[in-house]
Amino acid sequence: MDNQTLSSIFQRHFGEVPALVAHAPGRVNLIGEHTDYNQGFVFPAAINFGTWVVATKRNDDKIHVIAMDYDNQENQFSLSDIQYDNEQSWSNYVRGVVKVLKAAYADVGGANLLVTGNVPQGAGLSSSASFEIAILKVMSTLYDLHLDGVKAALLGQKAENTFVGCSCGIMDQLISAMGNEGKAMLLDCQSFAIEHSPLPNTHQIVIINSNVKRGLVDSEYNLRRQQCEQGASLLGVASLREATMDMLETAKVHMPDVVYRRAKHIITENQRTLEACEALKIGDMTTVSKAMAASHVSMRDDFEITVPPIDYLVEIIDEVLGSSGGVRMTGGGFGGCVVALAPTDKVDAVKHVVQEKYFDRTGYHADIYVCNASQGAFAS
Ligand code: GLA
């Protein structure tokens, strides 16, 4: 939807001309899964699906928000008393973000907000992070807070950790804030060093949504996080970022097998992420292909976050791509999407094999999005 249409819808609801329209993208992670909360490396791209927020300031301390995608549901709260809302759970992203923002910047005041988005929800493409970052962009612009992308990402993550209740890492918020058009972003989640890396113009990012409804996501996610922390503590390091495979093999006998396998995924995934990023720079697709394939196997066997329909998608797409491209599950897991880096002339074959085989085998219909890497909300 274009900004002009959004502005007139806002005007119809609130009876005033909006001060601004902000946008923040969702993301797809090319490689580096569950490494972010282990202080490791991730390599995501912001995508051309996102959240839009249209806004004006208010003179009181109220936030009045309308969610276009939830039948124009309205939610109101006062800045001086922000509680969790059990009825309209979508509103907790606004409530959480505004609460942490207000705690950091006393100057924040009321606002009228109209929200809409097109990131498929529950698909592992960070619809929630894009919502959080879009709200942060709007509020920081309205109230002239000079928020930068890293600070915004940390506030979004804090809202999700402390208010919404998911112990997510920093990747989703940071790429939504800082992504660059046409580029993927290597992020060191320990130092927050960012390297924008051009994507080859020979390949397309193809996202295949398995449409498997993600179950137990938060509990399994939080459990993985605890197991990683246990691994780090058994190895005597502050985080698995500091661990090596040699250290892990030496300590193996003293570790529960499940903790060993979780740690193995993280240590090897960090290595693969760096390798894939370097290989992509020089157009070495064979190495990218191998790294993405190994990442998937590691998520399937060691981290145990994939599901059979996703494994099947990866298998049939891999048969089409061979070493000319890569494919793996992307995101937190337990359903969601597969990402492929496909040579442009093989995109149709990827679509075809999915349409041909996926439903017959699994009973699910897949959605396919050919994406562009796009600009983050706070990126310059
Ligand atoms: C979710 C979290 C991220 C990250 C990924 C897995 O998207 O929000 O912080 O941990 O899962 O890589």
Image: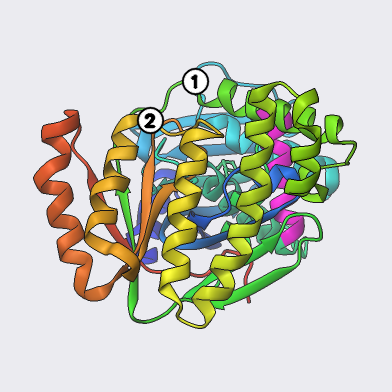
**Dot 2 crowding, Cα within 10 Å, few <14, some 14–19, many 20+:** some
Q: Is residue 242 visible?
A: yes
Counting other residues with Cα less than 10 Å from the Cα at mark 1, is it few (<14), some (14-19), or many (20 or more)?
few
Q: Residue at x 24, y 55 (%)?
A: 319
Residue 80 in view here:
no
Q: Is residue 172 left or right of residue 122?
A: right
- Give percent across and percent down for residue 234: 84, 29
Tell me the SS state at disc 1: loop
Residue beneath disc 2: 307
- State which region is magenta: 150-164
Residue 137, given in percent of the width and then of the height, sits at 63, 58
Find residue 219 and report its horizontal and vertical position in percent. 58, 20
Q: 340 or 336: which is nearer to us?
A: 340
The kind of residue on which mark 2 rests is: Val
Q: Is residue 337 magenta?
A: no
In this figure, which residue is indicated by the disc labeled 1? 216
- Describe residue 51's horizontal placement relative to residue 256 as left or right: left
Sequence-wise, which precedes: disc 2 or disc 1? 1
